Amino acid sequence: MTPTARRALLLLLLTPLLYVLAGAPQSASAHTELVSASPKDGAELKKAPGHLTLTFDETVDLADVRVLTMGGDRLPVSRTPGGGADTVRVALDAPERGELAVMWSVVDAEDGHASSGRIALTIGAAAAGAGGDDAASAPAPSPSVRKGLVAARWAGYLALALFVGGLAFVVLLWPRGAEEPRSRALLVFAWTVGLLATVATIGLQGAYGTLGGLRDALRPVTYADLLATEPGVVLAARALVWVLAAVVLGALLQGGARTSRSPGWRVGALAVTFGLLRTTGMTGHSSEGAEPTWGAVADFVHLLGASLWIGGLAVLTLAVLPRRRARELAVVVPGYSRLAAVSVTGIVGAGLVLAWQVVGSYDALLHTSYGQLLLVKTGVLGAVLLAAFASRQWVRTRLDLAVLLRGDAATVRPFGYSVAVETGLVLVVLAVTSLLVTADPGR
């Protein structure tokens, strides 16, 4: 085994230890759901109630619970006297007769997912024609906000892969890449998109959790409210790590290949990489299930493997191949091929653990939207692996000829085509991954 492959394998093997040292979650949590309401939905009451009691399946923060009238007015929410942290009391201004309908929503403290519903009560004899406007469907996040959140997450995943994988490619395989304009531009692009996507995600996540619109995603109060929650703290930490990543990137751009070989710089780059991967995984579904610690570790390995693979692929496609330098091809291409093989092994192994952890059953895999999206992702990933296999075959059978011909364009072109197809399909995989993060696993 080559030194490059040994270093990559060592990094994947040390990941669980690094994760445990950083502090892994010890308890599982699914999306917060309403367990019961008193009075219950559909109840017929003789007298107007003064309050409504809602009980959820886990502890909730009062700031995360919103109850609105059908007219859009927010109702006061407080703790129930003598109740637990999973129960809240809603003050009502109910009519003496007719129908009262309210809409509730709650934001999961772990991943920011919004759950919502509608409760209708009949007081005395229902008024004629009651239930017309009040019979509206339960509230749900704005489709435009959800699409924006998916797009922001997609951009964030892409930036993470390009930045982490690009740095690893330069450090492990191509130190001269620190001085190549194309690879430098790619790293700067990844850093810029990563920071902007994180900031946009904070606003969109806040609007998503409060069932607001795109305008709400731009309001300072939306940012302030989200940053007071656990998902907001995680996103703020990710933004801070991206800011720290600017120091690492700036040192590399100034020092070039010499900096990439510096032990001090490598320690800083490793710390930033760990922070970006960890904060990205904390906003997913990895901690849901019977073994949240193993799920979170698997998610970390999954993200690390994907970043090494995708980021390296981008640098190879956009920076190495266009140069068509025989000596570089002879050293860099086989090294990346081995690194990609180790990364894909980690992706597949960690993916199996995550599927078992989050989906939980064969029935859920087939009959839930989350499971079906996971199957789509698996199918596209299979196509990516076929393209990667074609690239690997070229490395085994045609690389020597390409080197002898000094990087002849006609000889290298088939490899470039297969790498381009692989890159395009990887973007689709990232898009499906973004959808999975906002989908309910439905365990």
Image (spheres, rainbow, N blue to C red):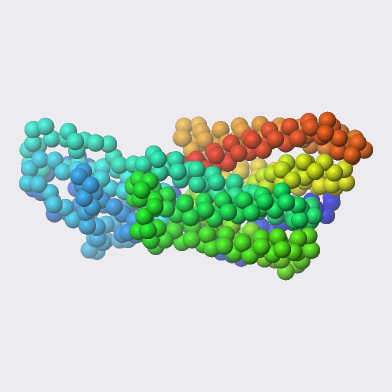
The residue depicted at 65 percent of the width and 46 percent of the height is 306
Q: Please give left or right for residue 173 compared with residue 62 in the image.
A: right
Image position, residue 97 (x, y; %)? 7, 43
Q: Please give left or right for residue 183 compared with residue 156 in the image.
A: right
Q: Please give left or right for residue 15 compared with residue 376 in the image.
A: right
The residue depicted at 84 percent of the width and 51 percent of the height is 2
Q: Please give left or right for residue 6 compared with residue 119 in the image.
A: right
Q: Is residue 20 above or below residue 105?
A: below
Residue 17 can be seen, yes or no: no
Give the camera-side residue of 398 and 356: 398
Image position, residue 314 (x, y; %)? 69, 44
Q: How many marks?
A: 0
Q: Quadrant of residue 278?
A: bottom right
Give the camera-side residue of 370 and 418: 418
Query: Farthest residue toward the front?
Result: 181
Image position, residue 207 (x, y; %)? 37, 50
Query: Farthest residue toward the bottom?
Result: 264
Image position, residue 59 (x, y; %)? 36, 58
Q: Quadrant of residue 261?
A: bottom right
Residue 14 can be seen, yes or no: yes
The residue depicted at 42 percent of the width and 61 percent of the height is 227
* Image quarter (top left, top right, bottom left or bottom right) of the C terminus: top left
Q: Is residue 409 above or below residue 302?
A: above
The residue depicted at 83 percent of the width and 34 percent of the height is 409
Give the camera-side residue of 61 and 435: 435
Q: Is residue 227 above or below residue 358?
A: below
